[in-house]
Amino acid sequence: MKGLPYSHLMERIDWDSAQKYITKKGQDKEEVVAARKEYPKHDKLGEIVITRRRDIREKLKDGDIDPRDIAALVKGQHQSILNLLNASLDVDRLDYLVRDSFNTGLPYGKVDLDYIVNNLELIDQEEETDQKEIVIRAKAKSSIEHMLMGRYFMFNTVYMHKTVFAFEEMIRRIIRRLWEKGEIYGSGQEIEQMASEDSKRFLDFHDGYLDQRIDKHADNKRDKKLAVLCTAIKLRQPPKLVYEVSELTLDGNNPSQEYTLLTTSFKDKVKELASETQIPEERWLFNDIKTPEFEKLHPFVSLAEAAAFKDSGEQQLRELVKVKKSSGKIERLLMDKSSILHYMSRLKPRLYRVYVTAINDAKANEITAKIQEWLQRG
């Protein structure tokens, strides 16, 4: 399915901060411009392409396929077809874990696919609907636990690797800067309209679209903030990780003082550090890496948090892995006290990282020492 350039990366941009910049830029103090709609998420974009583009609709209808059925299937909301793409146990996860494990040479995603598939059953949903749902037989519970644990380790080891995340964060900053300058499509409305048309504009909105702009602005003498980031991407020069806090707390306990100070005060501290080290602020990257949604990314989120999700929480609870015991009873895996995931789900992960671009090891060590000194002072 055609999505945005750089896939999910573009969906994880701090649009709120970007919107504040757009609101203030070129305006009087009291004047506010109309809010721009964020870029649509991939499933929404897929729905638009399938249901609104005339060429796609006609091809589907020629095959006696209702485009609305395909769109609902993509979003996991079809009334009579299984949710195979938006659940804790779905074909997407089973695919990318095995594929990424093979391509990276890491063992974490080596899922026992055959055994899992052979132990799936279709049952009627508990709600009064005609839709079926997938459950796993109890004897294959360990295979599912292995899959979810492996997924957690794949995220920690590969998807959230310090260098991978650094490059992604630089690209997010570049996209925001281009958006602020009006050099890429400016709003979600424009993207949705483009995706609805039969023209090539949307098809041309791909990785190469951003690559061209990154290449162009690497030599931008007027915007050093943008040029520094684009040059680092163009030359494949990752920024240095100068500080990181990674912690797990039990049952939603409060984070450490170190983590709290970074998340609440480091943004202001950067101004001082930039002056002391003579490294401009635009070369500092720092981020409170958000913990995943309830059972969307990995299982280690407190079960008690489910109550805070309201309607979305109900949807996510329906998407959790369900186990069919020998007695015929159906139980959510995370509620099973004989499962390690029941206990591991009590852990709350937190992660904060600070990077600086275009520095050597000696400078990185100097900055690390300054941050440590500041944190120790509290």
Image (tube, rainbow, N blue to C red):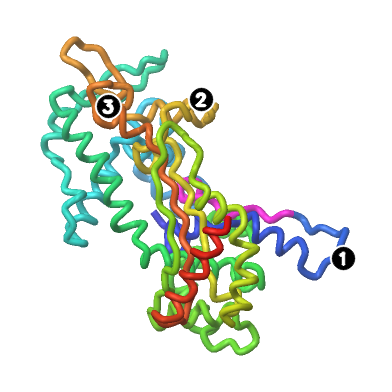
Q: Amino acid at mark 3?
A: Ile
Towards the viewer: 30 or 86? 30
Picture disc at residue 325: none
Towards the viewer: 113 or 348? 348
Side (left or right) of 225 relative to 363: right
Q: Residue at x 40, y 63 (%)?
A: 165
Q: Residue at x 59, y 66 (%)?
A: 176
For residue 378, above or below residue 322: below
- The residue labelled by disc 2 is 307
Classify mark 3: helix, strand or loop.
strand
Residue 43 magenta-highlighted: yes
Q: Start and end of the magenta stretch?
A: 35-46
Q: Earlier in the sequence, mark 3 or mark 2?
A: 3
- The residue labelled by disc 1 is 28
Query: Which of labels 2 and 1 is toward the front?
Result: 2
Whole-Å distance between the Cαs marked 3 and 2?
Answer: 24 Å
Check the picture and name the quadrant holding the C terminus.
Answer: bottom right
Classify mark 1: helix, strand or loop.
loop
Whole-Å distance between the Cαs marked 3 and 1?
Answer: 57 Å
Classify mark 2: helix, strand or loop.
helix
Residue 110, visible in the rendered structure: yes
Query: Which of labels 3 and 1 is toward the front?
Result: 1
Horizontal and vertical percent position of residue 83: 35, 33
Q: Quadrant of residue 61?
A: top left
